[in-house]
Structure formats: structure tokens, C-alpha cells
Amino acid sequence: MKTLREYIKEAEEKRVAIGHFNISNLESLHGIYNAAKKLNVPVIIGLSEGEEKFVGREEAIALVQTMRERDNYPIFINADHHIGFDSVKASVDAGFDVVIFDGAKSSFEENIKITKQCVDYVRQVTKETSRDILVEGELGYIGSGSDIKDEIPKGAGIKTNPEEAGRFVQMTGVDLLAPSVGNIHGLIKSGNPHIDEELVKKIREVAGVPLVLHGGSGISDVDFANAIRAGVSIVHISTEIRIAYKEALEKFLENNPKEIAPYKILQVAVEAIEKVVYERLKLFNGM
């Protein structure tokens, strides 16, 4: 099986993107994996620090690795939005395939300092173990939280400067870069901003590494297609599958108030997540 690095390179060449979906429980994992297998495309499972704490770091890694080895399938796991070197280090040591140091709210200088510390540690581990671990850096604050917001959070949405992106990559050595190009975490009730396709293209040219689009929930299909064509190779989705989970569960419980078997109650949530992920993966892969 190819490595995640090789799948990302292949996605760039084909002008498609790999879907990245966050999980908080087993239902989410099954829904995402079922959708990916139906389309036969690689997929990345993400856990933020909060999700990782709830699911269990080692437990999540064991589940994903078991699926990958059992089915010989390209499913990978990412330590999403980890704050601080110690948190990133713990995720690397546990066995994640890719880690993100989120220094978007830090100063440019501090972001570079800690991101490089993470990269240096990963390179050391890679040399000692031959594991191909990717490091993603983030430049530009796009808010936080996979939720529904009334408006764009204060301070969020300032777009990444291409020249700064180039310096950031050069000085840190990251494998992937997550810029701010009109994307915002969560869903904005008044409508999410448009993605700046030309900015994506410029940042990709100057930075020289594959780009990751965070805050994918609520972005239009046209904006997704334009962003992927311009240089985005991975797209993050979380809020949309959380909403699908909640709505499916509420409807089932309303219609089946006497049901108490968790595996029966939660099956509708798995199916709802699978449906959302299936449509997103089709779009990201130009199907």
C-alpha cells in the first residue's frame, strides 16, 4: 500500500482532494469508513485534542490501524489541531500518521518556533523508526469549534499572506500547510465566506507544499471544486457530520421512544454520517 504522502502526491497530480473527517465515537468511524470503501478512495480520520481525550488516543489509533491492515485499505489517522509541542510529541509517539501543530493564534515568530520543534522531533523519530509521519502547520486564524455560529468569530478570517506562507514553510520544513483563504471553522448562519481561488493558487506556488483546507463544512460545491483545482489536496469536514448524527438520532428517538438497544438506536447515525461523507468524497474526487 502507498503511504499517505504518496496518496497526497497522487491527489495533487489528479487535481482531486483527500477527505478528512473528524470522529468522536465508533459510529462516526464506521460511517466514514463505509462511505470511503464504497467509492474506493483514501480517507483520513481526524481527532482534535478534545475528541482524542474522549475516544482515547491509543484506542483510536488501534481501530484505524486494524481497519487498514485487515482490509489493506488506505485509511489514515491525524492528530488534528494540537496545541503545544508536548501534545504533538505524545501523538507522534502514540502512532498517528500525521500531526498538526495549530499555532494560528500565535505570533508568526512563535508559530514558526514551535512548528519547527515539532518537525525536528518527527524527523528524528522517522530516522529512528522509518515511520513516514507528516507534519502540518497552520498559518492564519479561521476560528475554532465544529459548531453553528451566528457570525464569523472576532479576529478570524484574515487571509494568509503568500510571502509569509513561503517563509513559514522554508523556516519550519512542514510537509503540509493549512492557510486561511476564506474558510471558517463551523457553519455560519448567515453563510460561509467564499474561498479565494486565486489566493489558494498563489500560496501553493510560493509555499511549495500541498495545502489543506480546514473548516470545510458549509463551503459551496463550486468553491470546493475551485479550491481543489487551485491547489488544495486535503479537505476537513466535521460540523456537517455532527449535525447529521444529531438530527438522525433525535428523529429515531422521537419515533421509537421505547427502543433501548444502543446498536439499534445508533445505526441511523452511522447511516446519516455515511450519506454525508459519501457525497463529499464524490465531490472531492471529481466523481
Image (cartoon, rainbow, N blue to C red):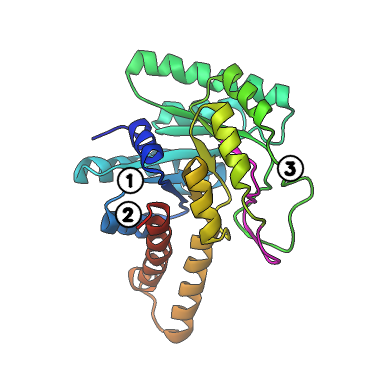
Magenta residues, dominant SS class: loop
CB-based contact (under 8 Å), mark 2 and mark 1 = yes
251, above or below 10, in the image: below
Residue 107, how many percent across, how many down? 74, 28
Which residue range is magenta in the image? 178-192
Mark 2 lies on residue: 36
Q: Amino acid at mark 3?
A: Ile
Q: Is residue 167 left or right of residue 216?
A: right
Q: Amino acid at mark 2?
A: Ala
Between discs 2 and 1, the one toward the N terminus = 2
For disc 2, the neighbor class at 10 Å (few under 14, some 14 to 19, many from 20) is: many
Please name the residue shown 35% across and 73% down the image.
261
Element at label 3: loop
Could you give the CA–CA distance between mark 3 and mark 1, rounded to whole angstroms?
31 Å
Q: Amino acid at mark 1?
A: Pro
For disc 3, the neighbor class at 10 Å (few under 14, some 14 to 19, many from 20) is: some
Name the residue nearer the viewer: 254 or 280: 280
Which of pointers 3 and 1 indicates the residue nearer the eye? Answer: 3
Q: Is residue 179 magenta?
A: yes
Residue 266, how many percent across, how many down? 39, 69
Q: Quadrant of residue 180?
A: top right
Mark 1 lies on residue: 42
Residue 133, how many percent across, how many down? 41, 27
The C terminus, quarter of image? bottom left
253, above or below 205, in the image: below
Between discs 3 and 1, the one toward the N terminus = 1
Mark 3 lies on residue: 158
Count of marks placed on residues: 3
Element at label 2: helix
Q: Is residue 76 visible?
A: yes
Name the residue nearer the viewer: 178 or 96: 178
